[in-house]
Amino acid sequence: MKNPRFFPVLLAGVAVLLAACTPKTPQARLAALDPKVDALIAQMTLEEKVAMLHSKTNMSSAGIERLGIADVHYADGPFGIREEGVPNGFQSAGWQLDSATYFPTGSALAATWSEELAYAYGTGMGIEARLRGKDVLLGPAINIQRLPVGGRTYEYLSEDPILSAALSLNYTKGVQDQGTAVCIKHFAVNNQETNRGSVDAQVDERTLREIYLKPFERAVVEGGAMSVMSAYNKVNGDYCSENEHLLNEILRGDWGFKGFVVSDWGGTHSTMGAMLHGLNVQMTGSRYLGQPVIDSIATGALTEQLVDEKVRQILRVRLAVEAVPDDVANTKMTSQPECQQIARAVAEKSIVLLKNEGGLLPLSKDVKKIAVIGQNAVLKTQSGGVGAGVKALYEITPLMGIQRRAGDAVEVAYAPGYKNFPGRRWGPAAADPDPLVAAAIDEPADPELLAEAVALAREADVVIFVGGTNKSIETEGSDRADIDLPTGQNELVKALAEANPKLVTVLISGGPTDLRELEPVSPAILQGWWNGTEGGTALAEVLFGDIAPSGKLPFTFPAKLEDSPAFALGNFPDRSREEDLFTRQYRNEMLGAAAGGLPAAPRQPVSQYTEGQLVGYRWFDTKGVKPMYAFGHGLSYVDFEYGTMKASVGRKAVKVSFPLTNTGAMDADEVVQLYVSRPGAKVEWPAKELKAFARVSLKSGEQKTVRLEIPFDDLRYWNVDKNGWDLEHGRLTLLLGAASDDIRQQAEVSF
C-alpha cells in the first residue's frame, strides 16, 4: 500500500523547487528567457544581429522573419498613443482607426498624487498600445522638473523624487501588466531643452543618485521596466547614449537591468562609444550601429560576443512581449471607452484649487449668467509645438464642459479676450493674418478684444477667465524665456476684475506661471493643466461643485522666476543657444521638404547643478524664500481635521498613524503629506524632504485612520567616500501636513 503521507510531502517538495526556480525580481524574469534567446542567437548571422541594433523604420527596429522574430514596434507617448506616421517619417499616414485617448499630461497626473491613478493611467496606455500593435511605449517621461521654464515640464511628473518615483513605478506596472513594454525616459538628467543635444549636465554623485535617478531606479528595480531611452544630453562629460557610468555601472550593474537601451531619436553619436558603453538600438538610421559595427569586428576593434550580448538584451524583451499579429492590430478604434474614463478620473483628481477667497467656488445656484473669457477656453491641447501629440478621438474643451454642465438654466457667453500665440513659425507668413493670433508672445492686450470681454463681464453674475499658456509656448525643443502670462493676459484680467469682482481664474498650462499681477485681483484661482480628452468635463464638475477639488501642486510656483534655485545661482539660462538637435534633423521631413544634411557640429555648453539637492521646495524652505504657492499646496471645498499623530520606529521603517476627518458637507479627497527634517545631523540635508504621502477619500463626516511608512531605504544618503548608500542614525522630526508650507503637527523619533 502506498504511503498516504508521501503525496503531500512530494507536493511540498515540488513547491519548494518551483519557488527556488521562480525569478525573484522583475528584471530576473527577463533573464530567465536566456535559454530561448541563446538558441535563437546561435542561428543568426552577424548581419542579422547587427540589423537589430538600429532602426528599420522611424518607429520600428528589425526582427528576423526567417526565425519568427517579429520587428519591435514603438509607440510615441507618453500621454496618448501617437497617430500612425508614414514608415520613415513623422507625417500622418491618414489612418481612420488611430485616434487615441488623450490622457492628461505628466504634470496633471502628478497633481493627483495618486499611485492608484498612475497604475490606471498606465493600464489605459497599455491597452491602446496593444490595439495598435505596438510593443514598446516611449514613456513614461520621468525626469525631475528642475526649471519652471522647462519645455517638457508638462510631460514630466514632479520636482520631488519620492513623488515622481511612486508614480513612475505604478505607471510602469500598469503598462507592462497589459503586455506592452515601457521605455522610461529620458535617462538621465534631461532637465532642460536649451542646448539639449549637447549640454553637459554636471552634477555631483550624491545629488545624481538621490534626486535625479530615483524615479528611474524604482521603475527598473521594482517595476521591471523593460527598456530605457537614453537622453540627448551629456552627464559629467559623456553623452547619455554612451555613458559608462549611467548605462553599465548604474543601470545594468547596480540596478540589475536586463532589457535594452534605445537612443532618443538622433541621439547616437559614435560607433565605439555606443557599443562599448551600453547602447543597444540606434534611433534612427544606421550610421553608427549598422555597417560600421561589422567593419569594426573585422578589424578586431569590436567582438561578435559584444553584439551577441546586445542582441540578447533586445530579444529578452521581444520574447517577453507577445507580438500582435498584423491581422489583429489596428482593427478597432484605438481610443476605448474604459480608457476615456481613466482619463476623466485623472483629470477630476488633478485640478488644484490655489485660492478661494469668500467661497466664490463652487458656483452658487443663484448664478444665471456666466461670462467665459479667454481663448484657452476653446483651444484644444492634444497637439501643438514639437514632439509627442495625440490625434484624439475627441476633446472636451473648458467652454464645452461649462456649457454642457450649465444646461439651459444658465446662460454661458464667451469672448476670446486675448490673442493666441502660436509659437515658432516654419515656412512663410500667412497672407491674411488671423486677428486672434499674436505676432509676439509679449504683445500687449488687443483693445478691441479687451473691450468686448469687459462689456461681457459687466453683464455676468460671475466671470471665468481661462488663461495660461499653450503647447507651442511650453514645448519640447525649447525652454520658455520666462513664466509670464503671454499676450496681455495680466492687463486683461485686471480690467475684468474692475468690471466684475466675482472673478474665477482657470490656468491652463503644463508648468507654473507668474501670478504676481493676477493673484491679488482674482478671488478664486484653479490650476487646470492640459487635462486630456475629458478635461473640460472635469473642470466643469469642480466649478459647479459636483466634486471637490483635490489636486496638489507637484512643483513650486515661485513668486518670481529669479527665486528658483537654478536662476538664483546663475546656473540657467546659458545665454548662447544653438538650434535644437531634434528639429535640426527632422524639420525638413516634418514640413514635407527634402531631407537636409547632417547637423552641424554642436557647441559644448555646460549646465552646472551647484544647487545640489536643493531642487524646488527644498531650496525655498532651506533658503527661507517664500513662493507664490508651495509644493503640495491645494485647497478643497471642505475642511479636514488631522487627529493626533502617533509615530514609532519598526525594524525596517518609521511608521505613522493618525485619524483624518472630513468635517465638510460633501465627499472629498485629501492628500496627506509626511516630511522629515533632521535636527543635529552631521550630514548636510535640506530643511525638509517629502518621504511619504497618501490620497484619502472620505465621505462627508467620515473619519479614517491613515497609516504611512517611511522605509529606512528612503532615509539613506549616497556616501561619496564609501561610494555607496549609507544611513545616518539619529533624531528625525516628522512633519505631517497638507502641503510643504502647511504642516499641521510634528513628532520626533530616533532611529
Image: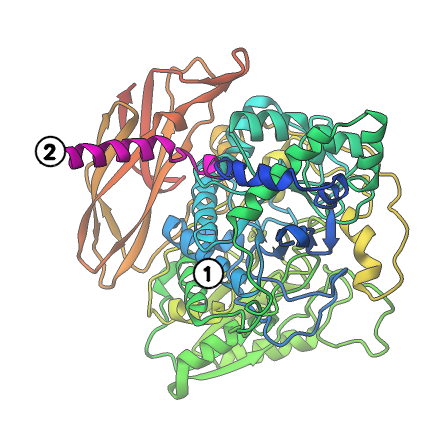
For residue 18: magenta? yes
Name the residue carrying label 1: 124
- Residue positioned most to the bottom: 408
Please state the total of marks drawn on the protein image: 2
For residue 324: magenta? no
Above or below, 228 relative to 508: above
The quadrant in which residue 380 appears is bottom right
Residue type at mark 2 is Asn
- Residue positioned most to the front: 1
Scheme by which the image is coloured: rainbow
Q: CA distance from mark 1 to mark 2?
A: 52 Å
| Mark 1 or mark 2, earlier in chain | 2
x and y percentages locating residue 231 in the rendered image? 67, 40
Q: Nearer the viewer, residue 134 or 164?
A: 134
Residue 555 shown left or right of residue 708 in the figure: right
x and y percentages locating residue 669 in the rendered image? 30, 55
Q: Residue at x 59, y 49 (%)?
A: 153
Picture quarter with the C terminus: top left
Residue type at mark 1 is Gly
x and y percentages locating residue 707 in the rendered image? 24, 39
The quadrant in which residue 549 appears is bottom left
Name the residue carrying label 2: 3
Tag 2, which secondary structure? loop
| Highlighted magenta segment, given as a residue range | 2-29
